[in-house]
Amino acid sequence: MTSSDIMVFVLNLAEYHSDVNRFKMALRDFLIQLKEFSDDNGELFVDEKEAEAARKAQLEREAALKIPGMLKPSQLEDKDEDI
């Protein structure tokens, strides 16, 4: 890791401060370059993990809706509420 790499990293952070996704990517890239990227940096991936969990839950719900009786009546959307 050279001083120019660190300068590029700092400039990227300043440039991407308003774009969270690009900021995280710059931070991840820097950690990887340091070769100190470990499991204790899990907070960098919280958004992606939550989005993936929500997507999986939605897919499971859609699959369960295709089979009558798989969901409890309380889990079903009541389409007559608008009336």
Image: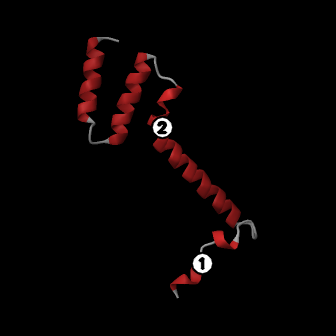
Vertical order, 45 against 4 (above or below): below
Residue 83 in percent (x, y) is at 52, 88
Mark 1 Cα-neighbour bin, 10 Å: few <14, some 14–19, many ≥20: few
Residue 76 in percent (x, y) is at 64, 71
Q: Which residue is found at the position 23% from the left and 32% from the top? A: 14
Mark 2 Cα-neighbour bin, 10 Å: few <14, some 14–19, many ≥20: few
Whether residue 76 sits left or right of residue 15 in the image: it is right
User: What kind of residue is marked 2?
Assistant: Phe
Whether residue 48 sits left or right of residue 61 in the image: it is left
- In this view, the residue farthest toward the bottom is 83
- In this view, the residue farthest toward the top is 2
Identify the element where label 2 is drawn.
Answer: helix
User: What kind of residue is marked 1?
Assistant: Asp
Vertical order, 2 against 58 (above or below): above
Residue 81 in percent (x, y) is at 54, 83
> Of 47 and 43, which appears nearest the observer?
43
Whether residue 56 sits left or right of residue 43 in the image: it is right
Residue 5 occupies which quadrant of the picture? Answer: top left
Label disc, if present, on residue 45 of the rendered structure: 2
If the image is split into quadrants, where does the N terminus sit? top left
Q: Earlier in the sequence, mark 2 or mark 1?
A: 2
Residue 9 occupies which quadrant of the picture? Answer: top left
Residue annotated with mark 1 = 78
> Of 62 and 53, which appears nearest the observer?
53
Residue 34 in percent (x, y) is at 41, 17
Q: How far apart are marks 2 and 1 (CA)?
A: 35 Å
Identify the element where label 1 is drawn.
Answer: loop
Label disc, if present, on residue 68 of the rendered structure: none
Say if mark 2 contacts mark 1, CB within 8 Å: no
Q: Which residue is found at the position 59% from the left and 57% from the top? A: 58
Vertical order, 44 against 31 (above or below): below
Q: Which residue is found at the position 44% from the left and 35% from the top? A: 44
